[in-house]
Image (cartoon, helix red, strand yellow):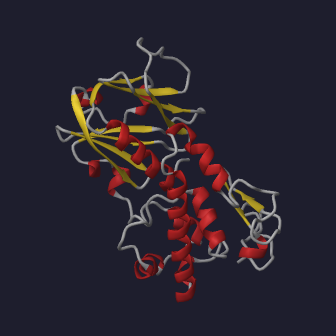
Amino acid sequence: MPELPEVEALKDFLTEHLVGHEIVRVLPVAISVLKTYDPPVTAVEGHEVTAVRRHGKFLDLGTDDGLHLVTHLARAGWLHWKDRLPDGPPRPGKGPLALRVTLETGAGFDLTEAGTQKRLAVYVVRDPREVPGVARLGPDPLADDFDETRLAALLAGERRQIKGALRDQSLIAGVGNAYSDEILHAAKMSPFKLAASLTSEEVRGLHEALRGTLTEAVERSRGVAAGRLKAEKKTGLRVHGRTGEPCPVCGDIIREVSFSDSSLQYCPTCQTGGKPLADRRLSRLLK
């Protein structure tokens, strides 16, 4: 799933390629992608893109008539930029193409989604806060005012494990499964530690890891073409998706805990005092 750094990079890329250009056609190929119908998705046709913004993992294309084309790529969605889109309309069917946006230059982008779980979402709204997922977003962890005090206040009273708290978009916007693993590895913290139990020193370390990991990932992605961002993300991950490989910090073997629809990766030596974590489906979690 694209997370804050990749969506931030897409925002920068689209700002360069879209702003100042007119949208001449929006063609939904998979009707399931449309989550709003008034205004219709075609309402942005004939209007100039004036700004591209990011809200958590949402991309927001603002136009000169005040409408916003807002997209959430979900788990398996992606944006493919093309300097020249095909002249003919795409064939509807079982392929990954969900929606096509064409500019007056003939350039534009396709939104695609792999797999059978169709969660990619497109909204046309007058205000981004009309999108339920945007309205309930917590603070952006890269905002200037997101300091240790604010993080401590967010975690106070949270009886969840820190891994789940970091992934909660209503608590902190933009962090998903992959970067929560990376942040906790950098903070040398067990993913199952209770969020409310963190000491002030641990909050400080987590804040530093949170900001540092995301900032580094954003800088690594900056300037990378949209089509290469997925590969760039994978090369920068130290523990997520690297089960069985040596930890780049200590050399211990990276372990995994599996859930029904996802998994997490961690280093026992760096994060759990050398103790492997129990599988959540089978036993109580080790702290």
Direction from residue 41 to residue 203 in the image, left or right: right
The percent coordinates of residue 35 (x first, y second) are: 36, 37
Please say if 212 is above or below 85. below
Write the residue at 63% across / 71% down: 186
Q: How many marks?
A: 0
Foreground pick, 236 / 187: 236
Direction from residue 133 to residue 74 in the image, left or right: right
Please say if 168 is above or below 68. below
Write the residue at 32% across / 23% down: 105
The percent coordinates of residue 161 (x first, y second) are: 59, 72
**Could you tell me if residue 159 is visible in this image?**
no
Residue farthest to the bottom, as pictured: 200
Q: Which quadrant of the figure contains the C terminus?
A: bottom right
Direction from residue 90 to residue 236 in the image, left or right: right
Please say if 147 is above or below 280. below
Foreground pick, 165 / 103: 103
The percent coordinates of residue 241 (x first, y second) are: 71, 53
Please say if 212 is above or below 73. below
**Could you tell me if residue 283 is visible in this image?**
yes
Which image quarter: residue 109?
top left
Residue farthest to the left, as pictured: 65
The percent coordinates of residue 103 (x first, y second) are: 32, 26
Which image quarter: residue 60?
top left
Residue farthest to the top, as pictured: 88
Write the residue at 78% across / 62% down: 255
Direction from residue 97 to residue 43 in the image, left or right: left
Residue farthest to the front, as pictured: 223
Write the residue at 47% across / 38% down: 120
